[in-house]
Image (cartoon, helix red, strand yellow):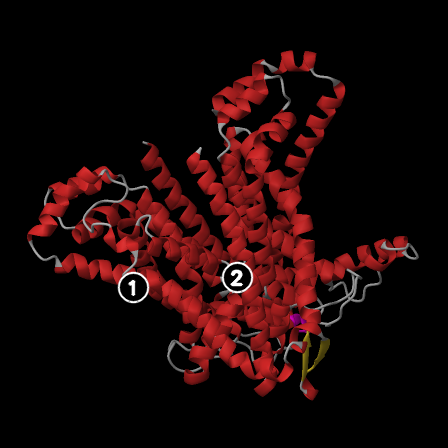
Amino acid sequence: MTDVLERQDDSERLLLDATTSRSRKVRNCVASIWMVGSLVVAMVPLAFVIGYVVVKGIGLINVTWFTEDIQARSREAGGGMAPAIVGTLLITGAATLMAVPLGILGAIYLNEYGGKGRTAGLIRFMSDVMTGVPSIVMGLFVYTVFTLTFGLNGLGGALALACLMLPIVIRSTEEMLKLVPDELRDGSYALGNRKWRTVTTVVLPEAFGGIVSGVMLAIARAAGETAPLVFTIGAARALNPNLLDGANAALSLQIFNNSQSPFPASQDRAWAAALTLVAIVFLFTIAARVVSARVARRHSA
Amino acid sequence: MASPSTEVPDASPPNADPTYGSGAELIAAGRVNRGDQAFRGVALVAGLTVLVILAMIAVSTTREAWPAFQDQGLSFITTNDWVPAEGRFGALAFIYGTILVSVLALIFAVPISVGIALYANEAAPQRFKSSVVYVMDLLAAIPSVVYGLWGILVFAPNVKGVYEAVGGFFEGWPVLGTIFGPTSSGRSFMTAGLILAVMITPIVTSLSREVIATVPSAQREAAYGMGATRWEMIRAAVLPWSRGGIVGAVMLGLGRAMGETIAVALVIGSNPQITADLFAPGDAMAAVIVNQFGEASGLFRSALIGLGVVLFGITIIVNVSARGIVSRFDRRIAGS
C-alpha cells in the first residue's frame, strides 16, 4: 500500500502540479504544515521536560545518593535517596508479582476459553473500563479496604499499583495470545495433549516475548505513579525493606513533596529524584520496545 | 458459571472450525478431565477479579463517604462552599475546575494529536513512522509527577509573564477581557490545562492512529485516482471513515484528563473558586483530595473520599460511553 502511495508521491506529482489550482495547492500545503507542526509542537515539551530533569538533576547523582537515608531537614542539602529508590523498586516489584500472574491467567480465560462468550465480553469490557479508573481512586480504594485496617505500609501501595496494572496486563496479554496461530494448538492436541498442557507448554511460550513487552510497559506506568501511594505508604526517611511493616518511601512521593518546598535544597532533591525515576521508567519502556520489535520481526519472518 | 460461554466445549481452540475441535473433544470425553476443569476454573476466577475489584471500589469508597453524603445531601455537588473547619463541604468549585481544565486540555491536545496521527499514517516517510511512535511512547512514559515538578518550578513562573501580557492586551474587552483576566503566580486553570494537554496527547494520538490505520487503502487510492491532493484525500476518504473512532479516542483522553491528579495538584493553584478567568488559580477534584487528605479526619476525610466517588462515577460514565463508541466502530469495520 505504502509503495503505491510513495510512487504516487514521486511520479504523479508533476501531473498533479500541472492540473491543480492554486487554492487547492495552498490548502494542501496548510494541511501539511499543520501535520508536521503538530509533531514539532508535541516534541517541544518532551525536550524541555527531559532537558530540565537531566540538567537540574544530574548534580546530586553520586554514590551517596544511592546509599544514604533521606535528609530530614528540608532546608539543608545532603543525604541520599536510597530508601525511596529501594521503596519504588520493591513496591513496584510486589505489585508486578500480584498483577502479572493474575492478568496472564485472566487473559488465558478470555482468549482460550471465553472466546466470544458473554462472560468473556463482560470481563473484556470491564478491563477496558478499569484501565480508565483514575489512579487516585485506586489509592482511595486500597486506603478504605486495607490501610484503615493494617496501617500505612509498602504492601498497601503495592496493592494499589497492582490494581492499576491488572487490566493493562490482561488486555496486552490477550492481544499476544491472539497472535498465536491455531495450527500450533491443533498440533499439540494431535499429540494427545490436554488443553491446559497445550496452553502452558505451547501457547504461552510462543507468546512469551509479547507478554513480557506488555508487562514491562505496565511496570513503567506503575513505577511512576504517585497518587495511589499518597494514602497508602506513609513517609519513611530510613530504608525499610519490609513491605509488611511500617511506612515506606517512593521516588514519586519524594518528588511530589519536595517540589512544593520553598527551599532550593529540597527542590534539588526533587529534580534528582525525578531524573532517577525517569531513568527507571525509560529503561522499562525502551526494553519493552526492543522486545516487541524483536517479536514483530519474528512474526513477519 | 451458568452463562452461555460455558457451553463452548473446553477442548476446542478458539475460532476453530467445529470439526477441528472434535478430535481433542474425543480425548476429553474419554476420561474425566480434572486438570482441564481446574485450569479453566482458575483462569475464570482470575478474569472475574476485574469485576470483583470494580465492584469493591464502588462499594467500599461509597461506604466510607456515606457520612459526608448524608450530612451534606445534594449540596455536596450543587454549592460552592468548602469550609472544612466548619463542616461545610460544597464541592461545586472542584467539579467545575475538573471539567474546565479537562476541556482546556482537549482544546489544545485534540488538533495536535489528530495532526500527529494523520502525519504518522498518511504523510510521514516510511522510516519516520516508527520514530513518531517512539516520541509518543516517551511522552507517555514520563510520570505525571515529573510533569508536575516541571510545571510548578519552571513552566508556571515563566508563563506568568505571557499571561500578564495577554491579559493586559484584552483588558476592557467584553468577553475576552474576563476569560483572559488577571493572574497571580502563574499557577492557574490555564497552566493545568496546558500541562494536561501534553499528558493526554500520546493516548489520543495512538488511539487515533489505530483508527486511521483501518481506513481501506482502496478508498485512499480512489481519491488519489480522481486527482485529489493529499489533503482532499484525507478529507474525502480518511476523516469520514475514522470520525467515530476519533471521537471515542478523544473521550478516552477526556477520561484520562479528569482523573489526572498529581500534575494538576501542583500547578492549578489550589484556590476553590468558580470564575471564567482562565489565568486565575483554581482547584480540581483529584487535586484537592491529594492536597488535603493528610490533614483530614472524620467528616472531612469522608467528604474527600466522597469526591473520589463522584470522580469515579464521572470517569466511569465517560469511559463506558467512549468504549461504546469505539466498539461500535470496531463492529462496523468487522462487518464491512
How far, Cα to Cα, is label 1 from label 2? 23 Å
Q: Which chain is indicated by disc 1?
A: B
User: Which numbered disc flags the more N-terminal residue, 1 or 2?
Assistant: 1
Q: Which of the image's four quarters has the N terminus of chain B?
A: bottom left
Answer yes or no: is residue B297 visible.
Answer: no
Give the answer, above or below, for where B295 lies relative to A271.
below
Quick one: label 1, few (<14), some, or many (20+) residues within 10 Å? some
* Nearer to me, A214 or B21: B21
Question: Most extreme residue toward the right, as rendered?
Answer: B172
* Nearer to me, A22 or B136: A22
Callout 1 amino acid:
Val
Left or right? Give the position of B144 relative to B278: left
Name the spot of residue A232 as percent of width and height, x first.
Answer: 48, 76
Name the spot of residue B69 as percent of width and height, x first.
Answer: 59, 80
Residue A263 part of the magenta-drawn span: yes
Left or right? Give the position of A102 relative to B170: left
Residue B316 is tagged as 2
The stretch in magenta equals A260-264
Left or right? Give the position of A4 relative to A121: right
Residue A266 is tagged as none
Name the spot of residue A166 as percent of width and height, x first.
Answer: 39, 61
Q: What secondary structure is the magenta-colored segment mainly?
A: loop
* Nearer to me, A218 or A132: A132
Residue found 21% across the figure and 52% down from its top: A200
Which residue is disc 1 drawn over? B45
Give the answer, above or below, for where B143 lies relative to B284.
above
Residue found 68% across the figure and 36% down from its top: A34
Callout 2 amino acid:
Ile
* Nearer to me, B270 or A261: B270
Q: Which chain is indicated by disc 2?
A: B
Left or right? Give the position of B159 relative to B170: left
